[in-house]
Image (cartoon, rainbow, N blue to C red):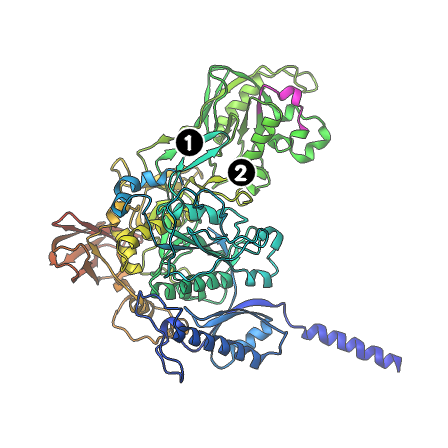
Amino acid sequence: MRLVEFWCIFIIIILANILEPGKAEVYIVTVEGEPIISYTGGIDGFEATAVESDEKIDTTSELVTSYARHLEKRHDMLLEMLFDAGTYTKLYSYRHLINGFAVHLSPEQAETLRHAPGVKSVVRDWKVKRLTTHTPQFLGLPTGVWPTGGGYDRAGENIVIGFVDSGIYPHHPSFVTYNTEPYGPLPTYRGKCEVDPETKRSFCNGKIIGAQHFAQAAIAAGAFNPIVDFASPLDGDGHGSHTASIAAGRNGIPVRMHGHEFGKASGMAPRARIAVYKALYRLFGGFIADVVAAIDQAVHDGVDILSLSVGPNSPPATTKTTYLNPFDATLLGAVKAGVFVAQAAGNGGPFPKTLVSYSPWIASVAAAIDDRRYKNHLTLGDGKILTGIGLSPSTHFNQSYTLVAANDVVLDSSVMKYNPTDCQRPELLNKNLIKGNILLCGYSFNFVVGSASIKKVSETAKSLGAAGFVLCVETVSPGAKFDPVPVGIPGIVIADVSKSKELIDYYKISTPRDWTGRVKSFKGIGKIGDGLMPILHKSAPQVALFSARGPNIKDFNFQEADLLKPDILAPGSLIWGAWSLNGTDEPNYMGEGFAMISGTSMAAPHIAGIAALIKQKHPHWSPAAIKSALMTTSTTLDRAGNPILAQQYSETQAMKLVKATPFDYGSGHVNPRDALDPGLIFDAGYNDYLGFLCTTPGIDIHEIKNYTNTPCNNTMGNPANLNSPSVTVSHLVRTRVVTRTVTNVAGEEETYVNTARMDPAVAIEVNPPAMTIRPGASRKFTVTLTVRSVTGTYSFGEVLMKGSRGHKVRIPVLANGYSR
């Protein structure tokens, strides 16, 4: 009997192992039925809640709240009907922009859901990653833009910018409301303010008008650590505070570090309100399910602008089309609700097709280097001057100091496992030999992975009484980037490998040793220059090396789209901004109140803040109108009047400069002053974007209906006919005629003369050659492109519209000619 029992138990265990469901994951599910933004009625007891294109949802109305409850009940009923209680966890109901929910369940349950009646798509959740003092002056805001809106103390007044990022450090001077004119209530914004669980104080203060956090998907995935990640809107990373201060930080905030003031920081729209939707976290980034919930909430709450410095780690596993997934569909809904969206283009440059922002309804922002450069130099005893990077004070004027290499003053050879040459541990080095001298350190792989930092080198040198430090880079991997880091003592990074070799050769010659290799005396000397003052260059802006490049793609087979991306270029390299005191994103700025960092993450909030200034001046403009104003007035020339250059790799992996193209900068570098008064705009709305989707070859029309709740029925003919402020034909055979419509927003009748130019391989013609447009009126024009010769590459050109009252409107034109 016992033997039978044993075999029964054994078989049960085997079967349990075979039949054990897969590990639970988070899935984003869309279901039949229209979300609030597009519900036109038809269900008994529930009246229509749909908004006209570019109109905000009135989330306080009983119609909206009752329909929202109805959708949520439908989500709950579907799950309860299919699965036993306790076998799944619903994380969010999405009701405003898409109709669906996020749920934590097994892959087997997900498969059941996929085949359930009324379910349109089941997508496994995927991860996203995080993708100023001087830029207001560089962009001409204090003199050319803020005065038109009543000065900096009114710039962005009553405009709400929503930040889906890593939270905010509310006590930072960039966000506090001391010594400012009080902020009144803003009835159009309905967001809430979470309370700090530690201090029991609200995260809001009038300037910060909303603060919430979203972490259900991160918790379900087991990635969330409440001690490190903070279950609140508090920024545990630094990134969110930085982006918020770039767009909307207070004006005139002194940036002080190590006893030096690096200028005064200001956001683009210093009086704009900040609404925080924390969905990114320190160690793992974030999850789309949380990001979509944050965007859905932000639009519900009534933000005017969304700043997204996030992008996918990789393409979503189950979608083919770049524009059709829960994230981009949610942003399409946001734009339908009148919210302008600025998204970082991505940091995968300088390689082609590295963008992570694809859709026509989003403003995709590339990153530029502005005119400020920080440089320093080390003068050796033999008179050689080695250039380097060092945001530091100089050693005492005209005085040279003895050079001492860290590997020559190690206290105990047994500590070599700690790599003492990278100067991260002062206890490993002999203070008596270092005090009063310049400490030479080596750049190791630890700096690349973030376990070593220049800040720590500085702290080590200071604690040992050194007069300064030098960090030598002897080998450099392709793509390595050395940014200046503010330090409190004289210090310099010799980033050029050949210059480091010169230093090491000088040190070897001037440092006599005994037969064992031990140093007899240190004879080499040097002095470090003053690196605190920036040099302003006319060869600015330039496209940053890391900034993602086009062509844009329409699917994850990397087929090219008839749509230009990125859209626009904005400052994104070495941008000063607020930092969270407990921020860990950048080891060099841990514990600091400000940080100077780079990325398209820094470029996107520049555009979000400038969009707020345009929205303030033109409150009824659509998101497409704002985007058009930014693009058509941008510039393709640098400060010296030469074509903008782009950083690129040479054959030897060294950095070189090449003439930039629209794949690098979109329409060009933002010009805020002209964007406030563009003369003409290229407007577009929800139905235009649907037309774009429905005419894009290769997109399944059922997939479009799944995400938009609208069947394809349009007359656009071709995606290149979308009324965008650029023209892209990725596969031009013989001749293509593209149509555009412009609207006069200048308030006075104006006559425009239209001209076009193009690279020789493609002929271009614009008709009519001139047109007079009354205020508020619209006129169509056509651009005809004809293949002259097949080159296998894109031809670039532009249409220029010169107005009789001084307005200039320019749109880039791109075409790749084929023989058939």
Q: Position of residue 157 (x, y in %)?
A: 33, 51
Above or below, comparing residue 104 to residue 468 in the picture: below
Closest to the observer, 547 or 456: 456
Say the numbered circle drawn on residue 374. 1
Q: Residue at x 32, y 75 (%)?
A: 712
From the image, tell me which residue sits under label 2. 588
Residue 673 appears in the picture as rendered:
yes
Callout 2: SS: helix
Q: Position of residue 184 (x, y in %)?
A: 37, 53
Q: Which quadrant would the N terminus be assigned to in this image?
A: bottom right
Query: Which corner quadrant of the image does residue 741 belong to?
Result: bottom left
Count of picture labels: 2
Query: Which corner quadrant of the image does residue 377 belong to?
Result: top left
Query: Which corner quadrant of the image does residue 371 belong to?
Result: top left
Q: Is residue 291 magenta?
A: no
Kind of residue at disc 2? Asn
For the residues marked 1 and 2, what is the alpha-carbon distance in whole angstroms?
Answer: 16 Å
Mark nearer the N terminus (1 vs 2): 1
Decide if residue 222 is on the left or right side of residue 568. Answer: right
Q: Position of residue 564 (x, y in %)?
A: 32, 56
Q: Position of residue 263 (x, y in %)?
A: 40, 34
Q: Which residues are magenta?
A: 428-439
Kind of residue at disc 1? Tyr
